[in-house]
Image: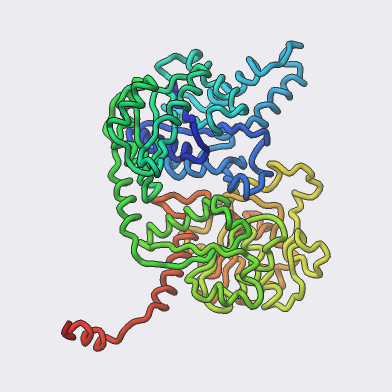
Amino acid sequence: MSKHIFVTGGVASSLGKGLTASSLGRLLKSRGLRVTMQKLDPYINVDPGTMNPFEHGEVFVTDDGGETDLDLGHYERFIDENLTRSSNATTGSIYSAVLAAERRGEYLGKTVQVIPHITDEIKRRIQILGGDDIDVVITEVGGTVGDIEILPFLEAIRQFRLDVGRDNVCYVHVTLIPFIGPSGEQKTKPTQHSVTELRSRGIQPDAIVCRSEAPISDDLKNKISRLCDVPPAAVVNAADADSLYEIPLVLHEEGLDQVVCELLRIEDRPVELAEWRDLVDRVESASDPVRIGLIGKYVSLPDAYLSVVEALNHAGIHQQADVELEWIQAKDAEGLLADGRLRDLDGIVIPGGFGERGSEGKIAASAYARENDIPCLGLCLGLQMMVADYARNVLGLAGANSSEFDPRTPHPVIDLMDSQRGVEDKGGTMRLGAYPAELLDGSKVAEVYGTVFVSERHRHRYEFNPKYKTAFDDGSFVRAGVSPDGQLLEFIELRDHPFWVATQAHPEFKSRPDRPAPLFREFLAAALTRAEGRKPHLPLEDTERSTSMPA
């Protein structure tokens, strides 16, 4: 039978429940356990697919086409397992399932209520992730203890322990130890109140993870232990770390994984963390600076491009590069402003997105990179805007654009996919999930991947218009990858350019800290080459003269 760990949070949002859960998953997997993870989100949206990136951050996409919370990206990157749409459940999706069952008559005319029908559906969502092939299921409960909207989830996980047995469930509560400047003290009262609120819902935490700016003392841990009725060993401090990849090591040193294994009666096994420690060492030793410009319209909220940023960091770890990210509003890349914002960059990333705002800036950034030999990587919408750039500025197709942004364009080089015509629902209706592609043998993209058959995740409605295939066959533009049936353009590149490459997919979703996405890895390598070529080098004799001069 699978063991279950529930991670809740209190005091404030954005404490790092997702990273805590992910890190714990990594530690348990390092013990040889088979781990999967899940996020329960309290908002009423059926899925995050229609939510504003400014409010919610990026939409993470799974292989099977689930539009999920960005925390699933953390889960996949840390435990190195591909999750599914079942790993994310929202209040909206749960109520939709219950109402659909009621319409089908499955409740035999009974009054449908939050308890037991909603809580039973929540428990079912948790239960289906377990099985003979899974040792531990880690479930993060979104929101903050005390929020009205998470009460059904708290009730469900309370009942779950009764259903499956006390030895099969562990509750981990993440809370905050704030530092009060005027008094110069770290305060435990918010943690006490948070635990009291959780206990009022019938849940006694088995372990408390205390987030803090600086390490907390043993005296403070003992105080929390006494007042919250948790053993001292189960009060774990997660002080701010320099890198998120340090967090598993911090939690291991604090003994969280040992506490959890003892509570769940999991066999004590050696923890293999040598590879992860090596990863952290490489993060800390990265020294070669490289300036990458990210051209987007959501740059005021970095979480909107979280997986892109992490994929760049993974490539930086591999290349021993210190990635200096420049967040550039797409409109700032237009016209006379472009040169000032882009000329000192070593590489440009044009990420995905929806809507017309910022599209002209992305087209301009593509043109600037193409004309000035700056490595450029386009993702999803990035590919579409790079196609529009090439159509306008090289092929002379004046006004070329996506029909999404200009329905009257004389040259709709990007157009709505046939499968999307007539679709009215917005959530979960795009081309979603993993799709195969066949790469052109001898292309740069095929060289990067090391194979001519690849699979990447997608999230889009528009694509390269196949009516313009012939127009783009000018010898420089390369259709480097297509769908197996040859109908959909998946990858493009430019001959005689250091790296001008784009994909209709989102390879950032499959990138891992110790196994960076191939396109990001080679893009950063090209950017490093440009950075090296831009560094001033003193003549050898001048260098020797300066070192021999008297002080």
Tell me where residue 273 appears, x and y as whole percent.
30, 41
Q: Position of residue 245 (x, y in %)?
A: 38, 47
Q: Residue at x 62, y 22 (%)?
A: 121
* Image position, residue 224 (x, y; %): 36, 26
Check the image and report above or below for 90 versus 532. Answer: above
Which image quadrant: the C terminus? bottom left
- Picture quarter containing residue 393? bottom right
Q: Nearer the viewer, residue 81 or 303?
A: 303
- Looking at the image, which residue is at 59% across and 33% down? 41
Quadrant location of the N terminus? top left
Which quadrant holds residue 342? bottom right
As drawn, 517 above or below 13: below
For residue 59, above or below residue 216: below
Can residue 253 be seen in this snapshot?
A: yes
The number of numbered discs placed on residues in the rendered structure image is 0
Task: Please say whether residue 134 is visible from this viewpoint.
Answer: no
Q: What residue lies at 49% left-to-right and 25% top-to-bottom?
A: 130
Left or right of 89 on screen, residue 281: left
Q: In front here: 250 or 432?
A: 250
Q: Residue furthest front?
A: 182
Q: Nearer the viewer, residue 510 or 58?
A: 58
Residue 534 located left or right of residue 57: left
